[in-house]
C-alpha cells in the first residue's frame, strides 16, 4: 500500500488530495469493482478518512473523478502490469476541505498510479476561472 499527495499551490489558490491505495491481482474477473478497461478495475468500497481512520463514504461524483483519473493513465498501467486482472483498491483519502475540489481526485489517482507502476506521471495544468471560481484541469500527453 502506498500514498500519493497531489498538491497545487499558486498565488490565487491551493489544491490538495491524498490517495492511499494498493494493487490486487485476482485470479478471476473482479466483483464489486468498477471497470476502467478490460483489465483494470477500481475498488472504492472501503475508503477511510486518511487523517481520522474513520469510514469515508464517497459521493458518486468522487468515484467518477477517481475513475476518470485512472482512465487517463490506464494504457500505461496495462503496459507495465501484464496480469489479466488489475484492481486498484483505494483505501484512504486525505482531504482538507479548504483546499479540496472533487476534480482534484483525477490527477491525484493518476499520480498515484504513475508512482506505483513506475511510469512518468501526467502533466496537468489547473486554472481557476474568475469570476465563476470554477477550476479547469487540462491534461497534457
Image (cartoon, rainbow, N blue to C red):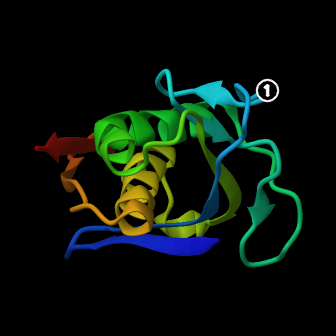
| Vertical position of residue 79 compared to residue 10: above or below | above
Q: Is residue 120 above or below residue 83?
A: below
- The answer to which of 127 and 137 lies nearer the viewer is 137
Residue sticking out furthest to the top = 38
* Residue at 22%, 54% in the rendered image: 122
The residue positioned 29% from the left and 45% from the top of the image is 76
- Hey, which quadrant is residue 42 in on the image? top right
Residue shown at 42% from the left, 46% from the top: 106
Q: Is residue 83 above or below residue 12?
A: above
Q: Specify whether 39 is left or right of 97.
A: left
Q: Residue 27 placed where, x, y %?
A: 72, 36
Displayed quadrant of residue 82: top left
The residue nearer to you, when weighing 113 against 82, is: 82
Image quarter hosting the C terminus = top left
Q: Can the viewer see residue 133?
A: no
Q: Position of residue 25 (x, y in %)?
A: 65, 46
Farthest residue, direction left: 141
* Quadrant (top left/top right/bottom left/bottom right) for the N terminus: bottom right
Please state the total of marks drawn on the protein image: 1
Amino acid at each position: 500500500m502506498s500514498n500519493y499527495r497531489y498538491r497545487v499551490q499558486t498565488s490565487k489558490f491551493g489544491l490538495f488530495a491524498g490517495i492511499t491505495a494498493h494493487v490486487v491481482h485476482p485470479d478471476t474477473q473482479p466483483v464489486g469493482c468498477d471497470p476502467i478497461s478490460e483489465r483494470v478495475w477500481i475498488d472504492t468500497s472501503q475508503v477511510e478518512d486518511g487523517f481520522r481512520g474513520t469510514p469515508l463514504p464517497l459521493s458518486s461524483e468522487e468515484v467518477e473523478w477517481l475513475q476518470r483519473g485512472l482512465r487517463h493513465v490506464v494504457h500505461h498501467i496495462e503496459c507495465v502490469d501484464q496480469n489479466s486482472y488489475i484492481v486498484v483498491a483505494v483505501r484512504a483519502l486525505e482531504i482538507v476541505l479548504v483546499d479540496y475540489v472533487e476534480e482534484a481526485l483525477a490527477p491525484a489517482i493518476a499520480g498515484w498510479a504513475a508512482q506505483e507502476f513506475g511510469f512518468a506521471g501526467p502533466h496537468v495544468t489547473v486554472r481557476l476561472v474568475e469570476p465563476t471560481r470554477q477550476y479547469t484541469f487540462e491534461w497534457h500527453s
